Amino acid sequence: MSAYAIRYVDRAAQRKAALNVPQAASLESLEKRLSLNPFGPPAISNRDNSWSAAFTGGFITYVVSNRHVVINVIDLVAV
């Protein structure tokens, strides 16, 4: 199985760029896990065709295109 590519919408990309170093490292680790299986742990189904997954200090919400093997991050929240 191919690894999924991950793309960020503009707002989520801006929030990603503003993360501090520990949060960015945690998100990078999460991205590696999700690219191999966007539906497995730590992903949680939102029951509306979107998924969420947490990283240290935040979480992302995303949708998956199996046809294009892409994860589209539609929101990123840092806390």
Image: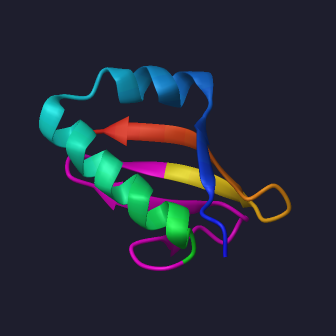
**Image vertical order of residue 25 relative to residue 42, above or below:** above
**Image side of residue 52 versus residue 21, left or right:** right
**Image side of residue 70 versus residue 39, left or right:** right
Tell me the residue at 36%/22% (across/down): 17
Instruction: Give residue 43's position: percent from left, percent from top.
Output: 47, 71
**Image side of residue 37 versus residue 59, left or right:** right
**Image vertical order of residue 1 relative to residue 8, above or below:** below
Q: Quadrant of the C terminus?
A: top left
Instruction: Give residue 32's position: percent from left, percent from top.
Output: 41, 58
Q: Is residue 51 visible?
A: yes
Toward the front, the furthest residue is 2
Colour convention of the picture: rainbow
Q: Quadrant of the N terminus?
A: bottom right
Residue 67 quadrant: bottom right
Toward the right, the furthest residue is 67
Tell me the residue at 62%/30% (across/down): 9
**Circle count:** 0
Q: Is residue 79 visible?
A: no
Tell whether position 56 is magenta: yes
Residue 76 quadrant: top left
Instruction: Give residue 50's position: percent from left, percent from top.
Output: 65, 60
Residue 15 quadrant: top left
Toward the left, the furthest residue is 22
Instruction: Give residue 34's position: percent from left, percent from top.
Output: 48, 64
Tell whether position 59 is magenta: yes
Foreground residue among 25 and 75: 25
**Image vertical order of residue 63 relative to residue 42, above or below:** above
Foreground residue among 78 and 65: 65
Q: Which residues are magenta?
A: 40-60
**Image vertical order of residue 21 relative to residue 39, above or below:** above
Tell me the residue at 39%/73% (across/down): 42
